[in-house]
Amino acid sequence: MNKIKNIGVLTSGGDAPGMNAAIRAVVRAGIYYDLKVTGILRGYEGLVQADFIDMDRKSVANIIQRGGTILKTARCDSFRTPEGRKKAYDNLIANNIDALVVIGGDGTFTGANVFIKEYDFPVIGLPGTIDNDLAGTDFTIGYDTAINTVVSAVDKIRDTAESHNRLFIVEVMGRDSGLIALRSGIGAGAEAILIPEVETGMDDLISRLEHGRKDKASKIIIVAEGDEIGGAFHIGETLKDKFPGYDIRVSVLGHIQRGGSPSCMDRVLASRLGVIAVEGLLNGHSGEMVGQLDREVVYTPFDQAIKHINIEEASPAWLKLIEILSL
Ligand code: F6P
């Protein structure tokens, strides 16, 4: 018989739009299945400090549309130590919490993976990160909203770039992944993108600027912050030296990409996966992330999910789309 009576839920790492929708789904599914649900504040930090709150139907009312996370989030150093994890485990037991839903990205699942190996405690993960850099799900919660935020910002930049005949370098988030840059680049009609997965990006860009059309009123180059070339300002300087004729500006979009009301796609993904996470725990799943591949729910072990990058998408074929479409 399943012994789970009380589920803890936390958000960890960088926040992402849709995390609140996921919390709401976990809480409401827990109540639906007659469980107690405990909110853990500030991610693993709250687990180590026993910063717990009781969640009920009302505590998640009117949050599905809100960005950020009502449970707060943090990057926690003490959970990286055996002492910290021991404290976390003791706090879970002392508070009669029988299982956990952790919402976050690769750092969150790396921590959970170490924890369950040490303590054999049931943990299910939900993919909550704007970066979309987890295996085992087509999309992570927050990615759709973030790329729409980028596209709407780049549309505005395009207006002014076009009016001044300028080349803009727009830096977007993605420490280890170019997937925000890739999709938003296609969506915003960028002339080029630079992503960490492709090392030849800068050479290709220079050659395209040398040989490409010179009569375009504006050019937008989107660079992922993790690109090995070294950030938008550095790229701007390099291009200024090589192409003194271009009027170049740099814009770093920054944390606006992490905020804002989640898109309907993110709300639905978070809602569906949040319910499945609770059902999965009740059915004995643990050590896995719940994702959605080709519309099907899929469980992926944490150590596979954190293998990052949907390599297929960061491929030459996708990059070629940008080249073809920016003629
Ligand atoms: O949430 C993921 C992410 O946006 C990365 O792309 C980025 O490098 C990182 O978070 C930055 O987060 P912070 O400024 O909170 O350290």
Image (cartoon, helix red, strand yellow):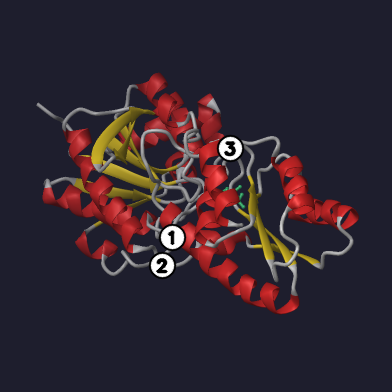
In front of the other: 125 or 159: 159
Depth-wise, is mark 2 or mark 1 nearer the camera?
Answer: 1
User: What residue type is disc 1 on?
Assistant: Thr
Amino acid type for the residue under numbered disc 3: Asp
| Mark in front: 2 vs 3 | 2
Q: Which residue is mark 2?
A: 261
Q: Look at 88% across and 52% down and name the residue there.
A: 242
Which image quarter holds the C terminus?
bottom right
Circle nearer the N terminus (2, 1): 1
Mark closest to the chain's N terminus, 3 or 1: 3
Element under label 2? loop
Does residue 29 sit above or below 21 in this rendering? above
> Badge 3: how crowded within 10 Å, few (<14), some, or many (20+)?
few
Circle 1 is placed at which residue position? Answer: 145
| Inter-mark Cα distance, 3 to 1 | 29 Å
Nearest the camera: 176 or 311?
A: 311
- Residue 294, position as x, y percentages in the image: 28, 40
In this view of the protein, can residue 98 be seen by the observer? no
Disc 2 packing (10 Å; few <14; some 14–19; many ≥20): many
Marks 2/1: CA distance? 8 Å
